[in-house]
Image (spheres, rainbow, N blue to C red):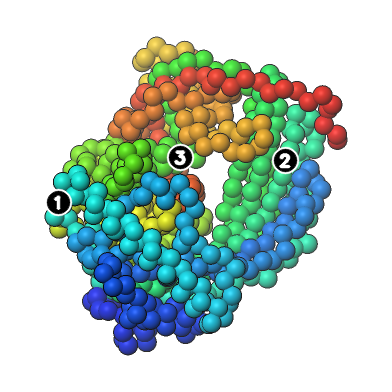
């Protein structure tokens, strides 16, 4: 059982009382001492002062085993790496360098984003932090000058401060590393699981990987806020590539979170592999899609992706970032829901909660556990939606409206924190069984006199011919076509959403009782979990993709 402590008090500068609460380890000793030196000595005559500084250290341990068609892959030897990150705001609470992108500098890798292979010693950590702090100040002071010039040229005189103060936060839990692992047992399981695909001649690749990772983050800011969080990330990763009867090269990928609180379950893994192979069989013989407009039933895996794509991204990034480049300013203008407080943004069937302090749901790990955010603010449960209406938004220290305060939702985005969600729960007011959901789908299709309708079991992203996942959220690989008269089902290949918009969130007419948790990932450090049930959407437009069959290999694959 981890030893936890949580300290919340009124905001005070980093001093003796805060320093006494810091965990006793080399990471915080080095960060605290270098932070004190930065606060006292980092001054440049005639230049803007540093206002808010953050030090982050991340210790990453990882290892794993893999197998392809029953043949062991190269084992990833256990590795350990310490990385450091420094970010800084220059100016003051009303006006500082945060939330501004320099078009010239943005096209180049940041000098201060991260340094890996930091020596794990007091002296080594301090030297790295000292160097990064110097570079961070150069960047922050330059951004401040450009931001102030930009605001003068644009005539911007906002009364909303760039930085809101909050109660001081401190959170620490025992820093744990990777547990002892029986590599021979996991290798045997990987070999047995991957060998199951050898009998399918149309499967060109099937790899099974057990990946084990432990990340421990150490955070300290110039106000005295800190956290020490240890996050496991163990996964079973299944990657399958096949060539369909019509010559299309497709890929399926499954990531199954592994819990360290439960004993290994080879039987459950075998069942998952068999289900994936069954999907591959259905995809191999699938017919080609035709244009469709009508009701669509999304199973939990597809619904989670649906909510992530249409809701999570639009409710986040609630303050627009400024830039001297019009393209960048448009790209970082913020989510569509930032100006829709009090409006209905989703079906009245749903309440939506953001729960950063939960680690798991139905034994599935939640990836965004975050008791303290990346600006040192306590993160508490937040109800975003009540009866379909948006009643709250995630806020970082740089709030979007006067009088607002941060609610602890600053998460790293590229180089600096930005308001984002964590573990999203979509809770229906009325939930139906899986059978009732299908009956409701078919009944509605009969009312519309449709010969068939669609069920999306998942929302798999397509993979290109080089086996690299392509982020094309509008595309799906396959769907189940359900015929209205007799309920007969067949798999259809190659579909994409046409004109997919947030309107679909308001078109949800029913929800299931089968909520599950799914991890969502994206670029940067954005990792969230979505807990979602099946949903029935009144109307969606599906059209065939424009992809062409891949060229056949000149020589059949060896077996």
How far across and down, in percent of the image, does residue 203 sit?
74, 33
Which residue is more in the foreground, 62 or 331? 331
Helix, strand or loop at disc 3?
A: helix
* Residue 394 appears anywhere in the view: no
Q: Give the alpha-carbon distance from disc 3 to disc 2, as whole Å.
A: 24 Å
Which residue is more in the foreground, 115 or 231? 115
Which residue is more in the foreground, 534 or 40? 40
Q: Earlier in the sequence, mark 2 or mark 1?
A: 1
Helix, strand or loop at disc 1?
A: loop
Q: Earlier in the sequence, mark 3 or mark 1?
A: 1
In the image, is residue 372 above or below residue 298? below
Q: Nearer the viewer, mark 3 or mark 1?
A: 1
Name the mark on residue 242: none
Q: Residue at x 31, y 46 (%)?
A: 323
Residue under pointer 3: 305
Residue under pointer 1: 157
Q: Residues within 10 Å of mark 1 (few under 14, many from 20)?
A: few
Helix, strand or loop at disc 2?
A: strand
Q: Residue at x 64, y 52 (%)?
A: 236
Q: Give the alpha-carbon distance from disc 3 to disc 1, as whole Å.
A: 39 Å
How far across and down, in percent of the image, does residue 112 sit?
46, 62
Task: Say whether residue 48 is left or right of residue 542.
Answer: left
CB atoms at circles 3 and 2 under 8 Å apart?
no
Name the mark on residue 206: 2
Q: Residue at x 43, y 61 (%)?
A: 369
CB atoms at circles 2 and 1 under 8 Å apart?
no
């Amino acid at each position: 059982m981890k030893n936890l402590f949580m300290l919340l008090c009124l905001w005070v500068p980093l001093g003796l009382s805060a320093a006494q609460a810091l965990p006793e380890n080399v990471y915080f000793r080095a960060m605290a001492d270098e932070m004190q030196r930065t606060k006292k000595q980092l001054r440049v005559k005639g230049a803007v002062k540093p206002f808010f500084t953050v030090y982050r250290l991340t210790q990453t341990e990882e290892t794993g085993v893999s197998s392809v068609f029953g043949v062991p892959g190269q084992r990833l030897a256990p590795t350990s790496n310490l990385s450091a990150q420094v970010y800084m705001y220059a100016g003051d609470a009303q006006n500082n360098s945060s939330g501004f992108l320099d078009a010239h500098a943005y096209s180049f890798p940041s000098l201060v984003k991260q340094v890996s292979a930091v020596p794990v010693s007091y002296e080594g950590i301090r030297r790295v932090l000292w160097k990064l702090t110097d570079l961070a100040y150069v960047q922050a002071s330059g951004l401040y000058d450009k931001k102030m010039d930009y605001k003068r040229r644009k005539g911007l005189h906002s009364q909303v401060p760039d930085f809101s103060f909050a109660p001081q936060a401190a959170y620490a839990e025992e820093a744990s590393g990777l547990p002892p692992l029986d590599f021979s047992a996991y290798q045997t399981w990987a070999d047995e699981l991957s060998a199951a695909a050898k009998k399918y001649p149309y499967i060109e690749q099937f790899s099974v990987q057990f990946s084990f990772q432990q990340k421990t983050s150490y955070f300290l800011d110039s106000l005295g806020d800190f956290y020490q969080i240890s996050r496991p990330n163990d996964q079973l990763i299944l990657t399958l590539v096949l060539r369909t009867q019509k010559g299309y090269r497709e890929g399926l990928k499954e990531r199954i979170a592994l819990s360290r609180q439960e004993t290994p379950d080879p039987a459950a893994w075998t069942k998952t592999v068999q289900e994936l192979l069954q999907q591959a069989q259905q995809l191999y013989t699938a017919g080609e899609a035709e244009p469709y407009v009508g009701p669509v039933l999304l199973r939990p895996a597809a619904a989670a992706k649906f909510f992530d794509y249409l809701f999570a991204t639009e409710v986040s990034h609630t303050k627009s970032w400024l830039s001297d480049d019009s393209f960048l300013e448009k790209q970082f203008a913020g989510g569509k829901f930032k100006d829709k407080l009090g409006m209905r943004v989703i079906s009245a069937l749903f309440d939506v909660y953001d729960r950063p302090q939960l680690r798991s749901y139905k034994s599935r790990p939640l990836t965004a556990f975050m008791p303290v955010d990346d600006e040192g603010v306590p993160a508490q449960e937040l109800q975003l939606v009540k009866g379909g209406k948006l009643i709250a938004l995630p806020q970082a220290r740089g709030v979007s409206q006067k009088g607002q305060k941060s609610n602890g939702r600053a998460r790293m985005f590229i180089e600096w924190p930005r308001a984002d969600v964590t573990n999203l729960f979509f809770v229906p007011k009325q939930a139906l069984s899986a059978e009732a959901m299908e009956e409701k789908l078919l009944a509605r299709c009969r009312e519309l006199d449709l010969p068939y309708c669609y069920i999306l079991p998942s929302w798999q992203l397509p993979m290109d011919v080089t086996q690299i996942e392509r982020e094309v959220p509008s595309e799906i690989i396959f769907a189940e076509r359900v015929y209205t008269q007799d309920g007969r089902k067949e798999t259809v290949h190659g579909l994409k959403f046409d004109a997919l918009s947030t309107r679909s969130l308001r078109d949800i007419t029913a929800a299931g009782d089968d909520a599950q948790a799914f991890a969502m990932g994206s670029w940067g450090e954005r990792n969230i979990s979505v807990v979602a049930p099946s949903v029935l959407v009144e109307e969606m437009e599906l059209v065939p993709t424009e992809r062409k069959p891949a060229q056949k290999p000149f020589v059949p694959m060896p077996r």
